[in-house]
Amino acid sequence: MINRKELIKKYIEFFKKKAHKEVANSSLIPENDPTVLFTTAGMHPLVPYLLGQPHALGKRVCNVQRCIRTQDIDDVGDTFHHTLFEMLGNWSFGDYFKEDAIQWSFEFLTKVLKIPLERLGITIFGGDKDYPQVPKDDEAAKIWQDLGVAKERIAYLKGGVAKGKDNWWGPAGATGPCGPSTEMFYWKDNKKPAPKKFDPRDETWVEIWNDVLMQYNKDSKGKYNLADQKNIDTGMGVERTVAVLNGLEDNYMADMWLPIIKEIEKISKRKYQGHEVPMRIIADHLKAAVFILADGITPGNSEQGYVLRRLIRRAISQGKKLMMQNDFTRRIGEIIIKMYLDYPEIKNNKVKILDELEREEKRFRQTLASGLRYFNKVSQGKKKLSGKDSFLLFQSYGFPLEMTKEMAKEKGITIDEKAFQTEFEKHQKLSRTATEGRFKSGLADSSEKTTKLHTATHLLLKALQIVLKDENIQQRGSNITPERARLDFNFPRKVTREELDKVEDLVNAQIEGSCEVIRQEMTPAQAKAQGACGIFDKKYGEKVSVYTIGEFSKEICAGPHVKNTCELGKLKIKKEESSSAGVRRIKAELL
């Protein structure tokens, strides 16, 4: 038996012995000019280094990273989908490559976790007929065979380059690092031995680890060239791995879920068996909500706040099915916080997290009452409720289809389920397109325009501190596209137009002054002593990159920067508005 903390500890210790430095677990709210809502993978905060920027801790790093994937929200309820998960990873930035990565994966699985060789299966990139310049990965296959994996246990998967699947990763955007991957599968059946031949389509085989072997670079003409810097990016999901190693068919029976399920049983006075789907949704969504709240997001009607609100309200809707009493989200939140005290963000924000859960639950129960009134209005005198009306009840009032069906049944009317499904699929498609679009445009965007805007946000932040006479102003988020920069910062009131004009003038004076932009590596303590801007908590590692712009700005950062401010042009602030309680938002562009 192995639990969450043991797996994480074993993994980090193993790679530290292989000369890796542990990097901090980053916020769920991405830094470094994100255009994606949440940190979606362990590699996400490390993209600048995969693109060639030096990392302050060297060329080998490892960590466990908390992640959110919004595209899985509607799939939660089965045994293995999760909105929030922890991902273990080890990376090489132009240092070791394929042989070491595969050998260490094998060593960790078989020697440290003591997985028998006969329970392992491997997938390899099998080539793509439309992309002959990237041949099948016989090199990886040979490494696995030399380690003792039988030829029958290695499956080549073909045709994944354009689709971004089938053992091919990337690039994240239109161009950049990419390459084949090799995935490790575990035979989860404890009663029946694994077949001699590995078939990845057999669901008894569960993927537990993925090694991405970034050996190519896709250029603007669509050509795949051998990369100057070859990288390794790996990922192992903590929840799934703990479940399969403990012989569990249901992830929610593992130690990172079971206490939450037990609390839901206690509050609802119902057993998990027979009520698995609603209990899984409540457990998953409230855990994700606790983590998002811990990173400073509050429920709202846009972006991260909207996702958070949707998670909490979907959990409450499922709780209503189980006849759970008011304020149950707070009680479950307390259990989740106790389970994850190893995250200082959760430990230090306990009161805020619980208060926000309780406040949103009260708001939503009022919304449900409004939804009931709407249902009574649109169903009056009808024999059938339209798909649009039932979808509006779902989208605007949080009524699951099952709840609407039950209410309709009581009135002796039916629901146009086919039309509801059509509306629902349209909604899903829009959500996924938006998520993918943000991911693809933002993850590897180090274009000239975004680089300039990123550098300008450093000047903007410092100018705000000076004009508003508040050295405690810090960045609370950023979103940069080639067209504009968006900077969120803590401040209690609206910034006047006169103040914004002064900020503009101050920034443009630094641009006109042709200030040199210098990067230095130092410890967080040294950075703090030198007055560098940054929130000095446990998120920093042993060394950080500090960017100094003339004598004006000094800030810890890992994003792309210009060499001199004279490259920037002229900054124009387009808008200043509220982002959330105590946080303001500025949108600016370079002319």
Image: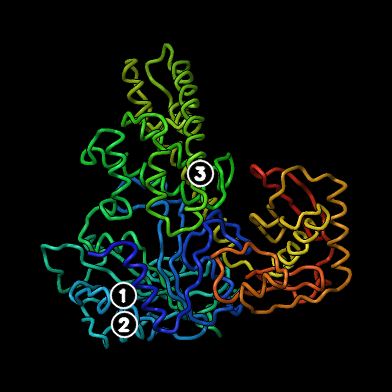
Whether residues under marks 1 and 3 lie with C-beta atoms below 8 angstroms apart, the answer is no
Between 265 and 427, the one nearer to me in the picture: 265
User: Is residue 461 placed above or below 50 in the rendered structure?
Assistant: above
Q: Tell me the number on the disc at residue 156.
A: 1
User: Is residue 455 placed above or below 73 in the rendered structure?
Assistant: below
Q: Which residue is mark 2?
A: 141
**Closer to the camera: disc 1 or disc 2?**
2
Q: In the image, what residue type sits under mark 1?
A: Tyr
Q: Which residue is mark 3?
A: 351
Q: Is residue 156 left or right of residue 449?
A: left
List x then y, in percent, for residue 484: 72, 57
User: Is residue 521 placed above or below 326 in the rendered structure?
Assistant: below
Query: Dot 2 lies on which element?
Result: helix
Q: Is residue 387 left or right of residue 110?
A: right
Tell me which residue sits at (73%, 67%) in the image: 455
List x then y, in percent, for residue 154: 26, 77
Among the two numbered marks 1 and 2 on one chain, the one whose residue lies closer to the N terminus: 2
Quadrant for residue 58, please give it: bottom right
Quarter of the image with the N terminus is: bottom left
Mark 3, Cα crowd under 10 Å, few <14 / some 14-19 / many 20+, is few
Q: In the image, what residue type sits under mark 3?
A: Val
List x then y, in percent, for residue 527: 67, 72
Mark 2, Cα crowd under 10 Å, few <14 / some 14-19 / many 20+, is many
User: Is residue 242 placed above or below 138 in the rendered structure?
Assistant: above
Between 53 and 229, the one nearer to me in the picture: 53
List x then y, in percent, for residue 289: 46, 46
Whether residues under marks 1 and 2 lie with C-beta atoms below 8 angstroms apart, the answer is yes
Quarter of the image with the C terminus is: bottom right
